[in-house]
Image (cartoon, grey):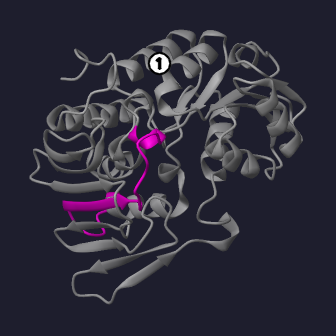
């Protein structure tokens, strides 16, 4: 790293890469120095759009660029294992989009690789880095609503998506669960840890991906979480956490909330809102800031998004898919 800036490489040039890069270029301690795509034209167009000095028409060239401190992997999740692994093998630190990989086997391979190399690796679970979500978790951890008994979380987007769309393609890890369900599952596990029991049902497309999935997660403490995701209809994307002494409601957009309401037994409701100084609710700068903080501190993983937590979420997603019959190519013996 330079004294003042962390140097970023961007791997992929799609919508998520553009959104993240737009936030990075506005951060005074970040510098986007290179971008890679599978085509020269796409990489050069992206570089011109954001004023990036180096554009590569292949991923390997970016991975081998020693003037990069950390690579943001924004490919479809079916390519996360290959793309992130390539960067780690070349000695680059990595921030990898969610879901981390297609399954826990691939996730474990990346975690083993980064730990053997002493490199930084983090899943881009921006929800965990969001200041409003961090405030909610702190309140729950401090006992503001007593012992957590139930969590409800939902995320659905309006379809229909045509048969050739990425979300309908098993080869690209299509379906509602990995794209959207990762959020309600991650929210529940942020507050309760890895569940001890999992039941699930899904409606599958003709291609074999889940159009919508519902799951009930249980814990030895007696806590329950009801999670739902869909690519067949837009939902409120709400979340609620009920404890033995109160409740917290996130009315909408729980994965990047502007506010939540704390209901304590015997008290008036309290509303907590985002600080305008933190930027728009959809900003990805909080996860970028956490990566750069960790790199400057010499940390190989973030305490906000620990790798063991990422693996635990992947185990849950695998278990849900096992119970609903969703398999991706080459996975016949992967899921438990």
Could you say which is closer to the camera, residue 330 or residue 90? 330
126 drawn magenta:
no
Instruction: Locate residue 51: give its quadrant.
Output: top right
Drawn side of residue 279 relative to residue 149, left or right: right
Instruction: Locate residue 226: give its quadrant.
Output: bottom left
Visible in this render: residue 279?
Answer: yes
Residue position marked by numbered label 1 in the rendering = 110
Q: Residue 39: x percent and y percent?
A: 74, 24
Q: Is residue 89 above or below residue 129?
A: above
Visible in this render: residue 5?
Answer: no
Looking at the rendering, the stretch of residues picked out in magenta corresponds to 141-168
Instruction: Locate residue 241: give its quadrant.
Output: bottom left
Q: Residue 45: x percent and y percent?
A: 83, 37
Q: Residue 209: x percent and y percent?
A: 30, 38
Q: Residue at x 45, y 58 (%)?
A: 255
149 drawn magenta:
yes
Per the image, label 1 sits on a secondary structure element best described as helix
**The C terminus - image quarter:** top left
Q: Residue at x 15, y 45 (%)?
A: 200
Drawn side of residue 291 relative to residue 247, left or right: right
């Amino acid at each position: 790293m330079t004294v003042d800036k962390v140097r970023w490489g961007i791997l992929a040039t799609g919508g998520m890469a553009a959104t993240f890069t737009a936030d990075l270029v506005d951060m005074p301690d970040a510098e986007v120095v290179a971008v890679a795509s599978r085509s020269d034209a796409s990489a050069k167009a992206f570089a011109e759009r954001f004023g990036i000095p180096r554009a590569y028409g292949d991923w390997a060239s970016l991975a081998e660029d020693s003037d990069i401190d950390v690579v943001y992997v924004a490919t479809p999740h079916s390519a996360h294992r290959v793309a992130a692994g390539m960067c780690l093998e070349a000695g680059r630190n990595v921030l990898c989009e969610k879901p981390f990989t297609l399954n826990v086997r691939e996730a474990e391979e990346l975690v083993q690789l980064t730990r053997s190399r002493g490199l930084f690796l983090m899943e881009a679970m921006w929800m965990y880095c969001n200041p409003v979500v961090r405030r909610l978790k702190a309140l729950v951890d401090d006992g503001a609503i007593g012992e957590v008994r139930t969590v409800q979380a939902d995320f659905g987007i309006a379809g229909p998506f045509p048969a050739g769309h990425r979300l309908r393609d098993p080869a690209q890890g299509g379906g509602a669960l990995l794209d959207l369900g990762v959020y309600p599952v991650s929210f529940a596990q942020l507050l309760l840890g890895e569940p001890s029991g999992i039941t699930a049902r899904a409606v599958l497309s003709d291609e074999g991906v889940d159009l919508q999935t519902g799951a009930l997660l249980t814990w030895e403490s007696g806590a329950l979480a009801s999670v739902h995701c869909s690519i067949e209809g837009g939902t409120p994307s709400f979340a609620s956490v009920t404890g033995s002494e109160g409740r917290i409601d996130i009315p909408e957009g729980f994965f990047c909330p502007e506010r939540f309401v704390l209901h304590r037994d015997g008290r008036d409701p309290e509303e907590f809102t985002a600080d305008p100084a933190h930027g728009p609710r959809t900003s990805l700068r909080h996860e970028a800031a956490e990566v750069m903080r960790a790199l400057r501190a010499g940390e190989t993983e973030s305490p906000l998004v620990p790798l063991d937590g990422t693996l635990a979420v992947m185990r849950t997603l695998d278990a849900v898919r096992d119970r609903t019959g969703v398999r991706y190519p080459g996975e016949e013996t992967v899921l438990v």
